[in-house]
Amino acid sequence: MKKIKLLVAAALLAVGTTASAQFSNSRARSARNVSTKGWSTFYVQYNPIKAKIDVKDADDMSFNGFSVGYNKAFSVSKSIPLFVEAGIGLQYASYKDDVLYGYDADTYEEVEAERKITMFAAKVPVSLMYQWNIPSSKVALIPFLGITMRYNFSAKGNNSNDDYDVDEDFDLFDKDDMGDDDATWNRFQLGWQIGVNARINSSFLLGVSYGTDFSEIAEKIKIQTTSVTLGYCF
């Protein structure tokens, strides 16, 4: 995760420096050399997700996530390759780990259970982007910064241990299952993201980004998401 964050930061720094130089020289170029036409993208993503738990000695939860979605980039200037991109996506995420379930009544030893959680969410990202066309190539680099609204419409879990006949289902959005309001998860989240995409031959897109939620999904728990994107532009 740290390596991906450093990669995003380095890519944005390099692109930002070059884009700044390009912008400084833009007055010397004719407007027809600047591409300001918008585009659409169908994409798939791999989303390593971490539920960061701000409690002493508590272990964070690591999810494997995947998304599919559609984005539309709109030009906001006739002379500068500046765009606003908005879209909608569907995200699936899963978690599996052994957790402390209780204690054996006879031996008082710890009893672990295998915990599985499956989540589904809809997300609406909105980003401000700058497109820099690499000279003498068919590649354009596009750094971006924005916000994502996410609605978590399902989060179901299961604890199991065959040795102790444990098979317990629960819903993270159900107060009765979670025990109290603080532990019950919230459905709506608002967060931010920063990253960089590369359009290749105007048709294919590769990208990487990182973001985190502004709000807690439950008390002292925030979601952090890394996204690796593959898309088709048209």
Image (tube, grey):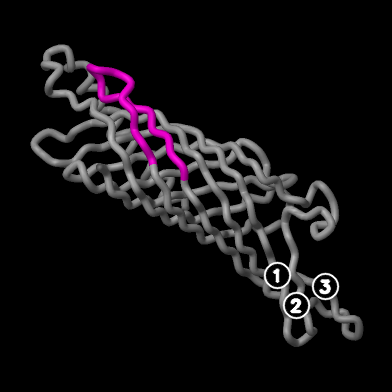
Magenta span contains residue 231: no
Q: Earlier in the sequence, mark 2 or mark 1?
A: 1
Q: Which residue bears the numbered disc 1?
A: 158
Q: Amino acid at mark 1?
A: Asn
Q: Give the quarter of the figure containing the C terminus.
A: top left
Decide: few, some or many residues near mark 3? Use Cα within 10 Å; few <14, some 14-19, many ≥20. few
Q: Which residue bears the numbered disc 3?
A: 102
Q: Amino acid at mark 2?
A: Asp
Q: Is label 1 in a helix, a strand or a loop?
A: strand
Q: Earlier in the sequence, mark 2 or mark 3?
A: 3
Q: What residue sits 53% from the left and 54% below the top?
A: 49
> Is residue 98 rendered to the left or right of residue 50?
right
Tag 2 near tag 1, CB within 8 Å: yes
Q: Distance of mark 2 from mark 3, alpha carbons?
A: 14 Å
Q: Amino acid at mark 3?
A: Gly
Q: Nearer the viewer, residue 60 or 136?
A: 136
Q: Which residues are magenta?
A: 71-88
Q: Which residue bears the numbered disc 2?
A: 167
Q: Is label 3 in a helix, a strand or a loop?
A: strand
Q: Is label 2 in a helix, a strand or a loop?
A: strand
Q: What residue sits 51% from the left and 48% below the top?
A: 225
Q: Nearer the viewer, residue 148 or 106?
A: 148
